[in-house]
Image: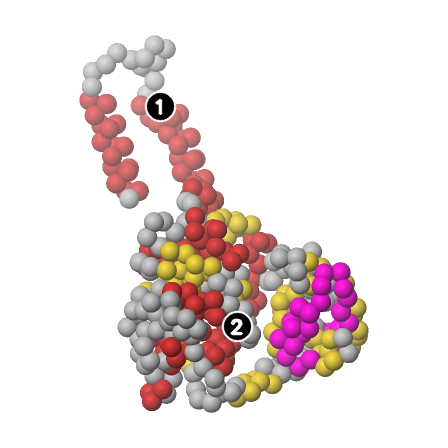
């Protein structure tokens, strides 16, 4: 494209040079053409060099751009005698994340589907080398939880073991900031032992904002201690809020049969809901999506809760481009998704797996194997 632009400009100059016109007032026609090239061409040459230089130097900014929306059904493997390959599709959505130079940042700011953000808003305090590994770990945890939640929803017993609730992230302004750090492990809460992250989450949710919790903590750098922390407010203002992301240390599950999810190079936890629906669709007869192409985003927790994710504007653009008819999103992402969905993509907010199943039932999906009555049927 740049070569074509240069050729166009060169043709224009050639045409002007061939025209016989009076010189502009004040133009010294005795000035040599070589000197005029230096005088007028040098600044342009410098600008070109500056542009080329800007393309070689990355800025401390990242571009968050639309990625792909691809089906998860062909990523899920279960024993053949338990598989019911669906005709419809459950889609996960991704974003493309890359560092940018000045020119890329400029064009990113002009694109409504792209967000150009400072590096610290993307990485936080995580070093770049650790950021990718953290995303891979989050994806592994997400896949594991999706399989467990789906199997339990179908009535299978899936035993779980762990060695405490490990702190993955602490929100900057949260009650836990300065009291807990990444890598700490909560082994007890309010005098009761806790071996699983959901045990800690459930105990916290029983408290109201302003109440305190007593945590037994195994420090990230060794040693044990007790932290008594006054809980803040969740966005809904109802339940107490500690402000940490937790997973279970050395978490292990006893599956009734193998469920394998191949996520490839995709990282992060936001495909949890999509994977859960994909496993359910694979393990049940009938069409969970009603034969439609349904996209979903949101984390999945062990209790079936669907959590907010980032980059929903970019994910909506990817889903729209893939031709999906419906996009299931967490409540916190709903307004942004709807405003970028266009006229053909329907956005539905869901707070839990049960909400997502009910939404699919409303779209004509076969949810009978999940103990849910078809849409419009009493009971």
168 sits to left or right of 50: right
Label 1 vs label 2: CA separation? 73 Å
Image quadrant for the N terminus?
Answer: top left
351 sits to left or right of 235: left
Which residue position holds label 1?
36
Residue at the front extreme of this rendering: 378
| In front of the other: 69 or 7 | 69
In the picture, residue 198 is in which quadrant?
bottom right
Return the x and y of residue 287 as percentages of the image width and height.
Answer: 32, 73
Residue 87 sits above or below residue 44 on the image: below
Which residue is painted at 22% across and 31% down in the image?
A: 11
Q: Is residue 190 visible?
A: yes
Which residue is painted at 66% across and 57% down in the image?
A: 237
Which residue position holds label 2?
304
Q: Is residue 272 visible?
A: no
Query: Which residue range is magenta in the image?
Result: 194-221
| In front of the other: 177 or 368 | 368
In the picture, residue 361 is in which quadrant?
bottom left
Element type at mark 2: loop
Q: Which mark is residue 238?
A: none
Which residue is painted at 47% across and 84% down in the image?
A: 155
């Amino acid at each position: 494209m740049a070569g074509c632009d240069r050729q166009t400009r060169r043709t224009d100059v050639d045409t002007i040079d061939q025209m016989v016109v009076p010189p502009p007032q004040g133009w010294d026609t005795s000035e040599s053409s070589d000197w005029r090239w230096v005088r007028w061409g040098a600044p342009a040459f410098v600008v070109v060099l500056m542009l080329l230089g800007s393309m070689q130097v990355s800025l401390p900014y990242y571009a968050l751009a639309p990625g792909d929306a691809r089906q998860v059904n062909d990523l899920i493997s279960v024993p053949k005698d338990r598989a019911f390959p669906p005709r419809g599709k459950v889609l996960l959505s991704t974003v493309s994340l890359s560092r940018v130079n000045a020119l890329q940042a400029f064009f990113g700011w002009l694109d409504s589907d792209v967000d150009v953000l400072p590096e610290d808003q993307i990485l936080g305090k995580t070093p770049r080398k650790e950021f990718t590994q953290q995303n891979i770990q989050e994806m592994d945890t997400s896949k594991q939880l999706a399989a467990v939640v789906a199997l339990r929803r179908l009535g299978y017993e899936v035993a779980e073991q762990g060695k405490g609730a490990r702190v993955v992230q602490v929100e900057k302004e949260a009650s836990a900031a300065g009291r807990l750090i990444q890598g700490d492990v909560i082994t007890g809460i309010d005098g009761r032992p806790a071996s699983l992250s959901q045990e800690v989450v459930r105990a916290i949710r029983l408290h109201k904002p302003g109440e305190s919790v007593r945590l037994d903590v195994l420090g990230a750098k060794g040693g044990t201690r007790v932290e008594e922390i006054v809980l803040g407010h969740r966005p809904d203002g109802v339940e107490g809020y500690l402000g940490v992301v937790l997973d279970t240390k050395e978490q292990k599950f006893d599956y009734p049969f193998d469920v394998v999810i191949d996520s490839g190079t995709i990282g992060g936890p936001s495909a949890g809901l999509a994977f859960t629906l994909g496993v359910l669709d694979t393990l049940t007869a009938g069409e969970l999506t009603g034969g439609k192409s349904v996209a979903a985003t949101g984390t999945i927790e062990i209790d079936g809760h669907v959590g907010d994710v980032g980059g929903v504007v970019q994910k909506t653009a990817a889903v729209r481009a893939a031709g999906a008819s419906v996009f299931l999103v967490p409540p916190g992402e709903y307004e942004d998704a709807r405003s970028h969905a266009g006229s053909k993509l329907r956005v539905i907010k869901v707070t839990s797996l049960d909400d997502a199943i009910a939404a699919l039932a409303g779209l004509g999906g076969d949810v009978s194997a999940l103990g849910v009555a078809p849409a419009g049927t009493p009971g």
